[in-house]
Amino acid sequence: GFRYYMVAECEFNSSKLNDIEFTESYYYNKLEFIRFSSSVGKFVGYTEHGIKNAERWNNGPEVIARRAQKERVCFHNVGVFTESALTKS
């Protein structure tokens, strides 16, 4: 069979918004074909299919929605996880 999946990550080394990076990667059969990175601010394609989708998504509402994810998802959860880890150490 075939496998399609997406991985979203929040990488951080402090709870400050500038120290957080949100990435969302799309894979098909273990090959990453497109990625959004908050540090780049847009989708980047790595295959022919990914490049076509990146061009379309960067000119549509998808890129605006992903730019908001850093603050909406990562910033909130980093604070929760950091507080939780600090109270247990």
Image: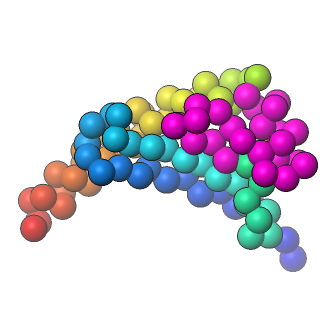
Q: How many numbered circles does the render carry?
A: 0
Q: Quadrant of residue 3?
A: bottom right
Identify which residue is drawn at 72% across, 41% down: 44
Residues 74 and 17: in front is 17
Q: Residue 39 location, x and y as percent?
A: 51, 37
Identify which residue is drawn at 63% across, 42% down: 36
Identify which residue is drawn at 10% across, 67% down: 89
Residue 66 appears anywhere in the view: no
From the viewer's perspective, is 37 left or right of 52? left
Q: Is residue 22 above or below residue 27?
A: above
| Residue 11 on the magenta span | no
Magenta span of residues: 35-58
Q: Quadrant of residue 28?
A: bottom right
From the viewer's perspective, is 10 left or right of 19? right
Residues 75 and 14: in front is 14
Identify which residue is drawn at 84% across, 42% down: 51
- Looking at the rendering, in which quadrant would you find the N terminus? bottom right
Q: Is residue 6 above or below residue 62?
A: below
Q: Quick one: which residue is furthest to the right in this view? A: 48
From the viewer's perspective, is 38 left or right of 49? left
Q: Residue 46 location, x and y as percent?
A: 78, 51
| Image coloring type | rainbow
